Amino acid sequence: MSQHRPTINANDCIIKIDQLNHQVFPGGKALPILHDVNLQIQRGESVAIVGRSGSGKTTLLGLMAGLDVPTSGEINLDGQPISQLSEDARAQLRASKVGFVFQSFQLLPALTALENVLLPLELAGHASPRGKATQLLSQVGLADRLGHTPRQLSGGEQQRVAIARAFAVDPVILFADEPTGNLDSETGATITDILMQMNQQQNTTLVMVTHDSQLARRCDRQFQIDAGRITQS
């Protein structure tokens, strides 16, 4: 765990969750996923949500990001009650404030590394998208791979591109879903170093779900989730 755990100030919580419950209805029958989750995450801190497969951690991440709405309870994201927003309003909030890093990279296969990072910058109307994208790819150690497509890159290199893309629009919150899950341990350690370094440089709030205890210990705080309940922090 980080040596510099921040003091939690309720007035500076960028994510605040109150009495969150979520169910899905396969075959018309209610299946509870999350139970009475309460959570506060401070601006600028890094948080790991740790749990086994099926514990509800990825569902929780998706709800925090506004990719879905909870069955009941409240989620505030940077002061916005996202469970009360329309789908379009949630999408606009994500576009302006949120970055994502996924286990499966989610790169566009027909685009080069540079073009994958350029895309969100161009959509956001950045004044100098090519310069910014090139700078970010240099920061993650891919200055000599700008013209390569994903299939010409290793898994670790693809995740570096994904990290550069996630930071492209200067998000205030970065959500990471098993960012080292598809990588070997050595490559995963390198990706962890890059992710944590860039997060610190940009003072982003990092929220990740992982089953990797070493990765979780790099964060300021850890929350354990089991059967849809936060069991310790």
Image: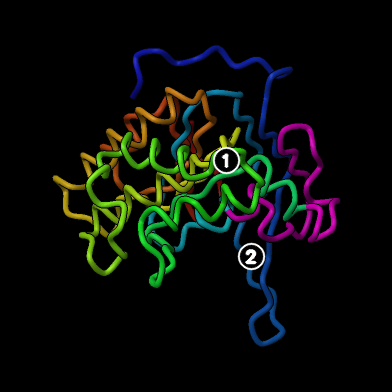
Residue 14 spot, x, y in % from top left: 67, 29
Distance between the alpha carbons at the discs numbered 1 and 2: 35 Å
Residue at the location (47% across, 33% down)?
A: 47
Location of the N terminus (image quadrant): top left
Q: Crowding at label 1, few (<14), some or many (≥20) Cα neighbours within 10 Å?
A: many
Is residue 223 depicted above or below 115 in this figure? above
Along the line of sight, which residue is nearer the eye, 122 or 225? 122
Residue at the location (69% across, 19% down)?
A: 12
Q: Secondary structure at mark 2?
A: strand
Name the residue furthest bottom: 27
Q: Which mark is residue 216?
A: none
- Which contiguous range is marked in magenta? 62-89
Q: Please check the rendered image and state whether residue 70 is part of the magenta-colored stretch, yes or no.
A: yes
Look at mark 1 in the image and give the residue it sits on: 169
Amino acid on which disc 2 is placed = Pro
Q: Is residue 23 left or right of residue 188?
A: right
